[in-house]
Image (spheres, helix red, strand yellow):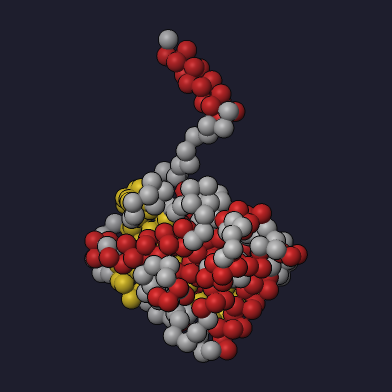
Amino acid sequence: MAGMISLLSTLLLVTSTAFGQARPPQYPPLPAGIQADRNISYDKYPETVLDVFSPEAGGAGKRPGVLVIHGGGWVGGTKEAMWEQWVKRYLDKGFVVANVEYRLAKAAPAPAAVEDVLKAAQWFSSNAKKYSVDTKRLVVTGGSAGGHLALMVGMTPKSAKLGKPAKVAAVVNFYGITDVADQLSGPNMRQYAVTWVPESPERLVLARRLSPMSYVRRGLPPILTVHGDADPTVPYEHGVKLTKALVGVGVKAEMISVPGGKHGFPKEKLDELYPQIWQFLERNGVIR
């Protein structure tokens, strides 16, 4: 009977997956010494949840914290997919990690995702004491659309009317979109951007409100951009132009260009890149 139940469970799993009801994304087993609070609501929507991972307390005092934001063109992706090459790397470095889910385009189009991640950042700051996080050493990071959202967390002013501005010590942007309008039409148009920012009379006005390039100014936190110069999805120039503009107004902005790099990097390349990221965070007082 037990064998029959096992076979039936397998058949049900295969059938449900075949009909588009795939299993929900899962994390791998947690490493020893890591604590997790999962699917914490930071706002009123079902999608607005985050997971907090932290090293067990051991007299280390307050730790740096990082907000991790997944990519997927604002139309897909999950926080669980960020574990191996994002969450775990920061945990190994002693950070407390808040791994964020937000509303995708199918639940709510732009500007919902930006509003959500700003609220997630506010939640993390408000709950920093509970997790022994030093609010003066908060970082935000993400890749692709997650890189865009990380930039928006670090750069969005009150005047944008997208939510309460966040206070972070640094931004680490992997190949994020910096000019949303550039991906709505012309040679760099992408379907994910068109889906996230649908047609409307105010479409281009909204696109500018959602673009990090619109908020280049003095007083921003240090910003590191990592971008492959052969990226076929988000043009390399997005990172180049943002970094140049930031440096031009006196922001501590740096860029790591990856020769021949596509949209996303294999583990071996990330193994080379992360020491440079840690050095950037050390130079700016996040890692001590």
Left or right of 43, for residue 70: right
Residue 82 visible: yes
Which is nearer the eye, 286 or 39? Answer: 39
Give the farthest residue toward the right: 187
Residue 286 in the image: state x and y as whole percent. Answer: 40, 75
In percent of the image, x 66 and y 54: which residue is there?
191
Q: Quadrant of residue 42?
A: bottom left
Residue 174 in the image: state x and y as whole percent. Answer: 57, 66
Residue 77 in the image: state x and y as whole percent. Answer: 54, 50
* Quadrant housing the C terminus: bottom left
Q: Is residue 127 above or below residue 160?
A: above
Give the farthest residue toward the top: 1
Residue 190 in the image: state x and y as whole percent. Answer: 68, 58
Give the farthest residue toward the front: 201
In percent of the image, x 55 and y 83: which residue is there?
246
In percent of the image, x 56 and y 51: which residue is there?
75
Left or right of 204, for residue 23: left
